[in-house]
Image: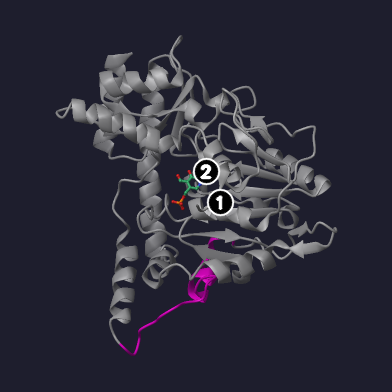
Amino acid sequence: MARINDNFLKLKAGYLFPEIGRRVAAYAEANPDANLIRCGIGDVTEALPNVVREAMHKAVDELGCRDTFRGYGPEQGYDFLRNAIAENAFAGLDISANDIFVSDGSKCDTGNILDIFGPGNTIAITDPVYPVYVDTNVMIGNTGDADEAGRYEGLVYLPCTAENNFVPAIPEEKVDIVYLCYPNNPTGAAATREQLQAWVDYALKNDAIILYDAAYESFIQDPEVPKSIYEIEGAKQCALEFRSFSKNGGFTGVRCGYIVIPDTVFGTTESDEKISIKQLWSRRTSTKFNGASYPVQRGAEAIFSEAGKAEVAALVEHYMANAKLLREACTELGLKVFGGENAPYVWVACPEGLTSWDMFDKMLEEANVVITPGSGFGAAGEGYFRISAFNSRENVEEVCTRLKALL
Ligand code: PLP
């Protein structure tokens, strides 16, 4: 019989969102008339920008004509998109098109990146955290088993609490790889320039690599908050940045993202030979990926047109106004509220005496609102819940009304 990868068996009950899905489906089946509002999974709700649709239509038409047909594209992404990204998203930051690897989204990228790192690295993750970073490390064999609280042996957990404004303190020990995500999912926290500089300085001192997930950068409202890790001195020597069109451009179903890997980030072999991370990722990409689809890349390119920027700004404004309403409603109820100012997630302390899953069940059963239990993002998320601002205004107003009636 074929041997399986035993590491998969170490995974706790399953990825958070399937578990939420299971509970919601069971409730909906038992209560078919319930008018459920979903603020759980961070999926966008508003329509794709017009310029994106037009660009994709045009690209599909090109594929329908023999003279303009395109087959396999470059694995790393078309130059038109890589150039648009470098010129717009990283203007003035000395990032070139050649540093950009286009993909079908950041979930795959943040998981796949582990292909190029060997065993034996000390890996640090924040707690709470986007669960993909943890589970992909478990799958590849970088951890031991999980304890009762769901913490895996072998990972270094960096607690993110109200006391440290949900940005972890620099660890005493040396780690080799650290995942940072700002603006943060799930806490909605943003990291300041000083905090990111401290992390870059730590990485340079310890020869560590920062895997910086900036999927929510376009939601930053405060001009003082860095949008890219490359705004920080020294980051080009130690950081990779993950970006996605999912949340700013409404691409959760369309699928497109990218990784930025400067030439100056290195790892070592077992015999201490320095190897370029970009070179490895490029090799990995050429072997395992055939590029994001052409119409999708044309759609992503359109986001950087003047009309595209205006449509994205309107989408961001819509979701951030939702976040403001949710923040205000929870604050009015006397709850402790975090996030929602530079990110589309509001992170709320549960009312006294309720665990995260208690609050999830209460909201589902008594208010018919689906939220995300904080403990699903890690042990330090216990006692919190996350409300996603990705919704219609009407639904968000209704959620605020139901919250007020419930608590
Ligand atoms: N990174 C973070 C922190 C996320 O929250 C998400 C999606 O929720 C992703 C990455 C995945 O993005 P994509 O849709 O590009 O796969």
Q: How many marks?
A: 2
Please name whichever residue, 307 or 289, is drawn nearer the observer in this view of the structure.
Answer: 289
Q: Residue at x 63, y 45 (%)?
A: 141
Residue at the extreme front of the image, as rendered = 1
Q: Amino acid at mark 1?
A: Thr
Q: Quadrant of residue 366?
A: top left
Give percent across and percent down for residue 20.
Answer: 37, 32
Q: Residue at x 71, y 31 (%)?
A: 169
Q: Earlier in the sequence, mark 2 or mark 1?
A: 1
> Is 354 on the left or on the right of 268, as rendered?
left
Look at mark 2 in the image and give the residue it sits on.
132
Q: Give the magenta range.
A: 66-90
Q: Is residue 39 visible?
A: no
- Position of residue 319 relative to residue 231, above or below, is above
At mark 1, the secondary structure is helix
> Is 390 on the left or on the right of 225, as rendered?
left
Give percent across and percent down for residue 346.
Answer: 44, 31
Which numbered circle lies on residue 110?
1
Q: Amino acid at mark 2?
A: Val
At mark 2, the secondary structure is helix
- Label 1 Cα crowd, 10 Å radius (few <14 / some 14-19 / many 20+): many
Colour logic? one colour
Q: Is residue 67 magenta?
A: yes
- Label 2 Cα crowd, 10 Å radius (few <14 / some 14-19 / many 20+): some
The reply to whether callout 2 and callout 1 are in contact (CB within 8 Å) is yes
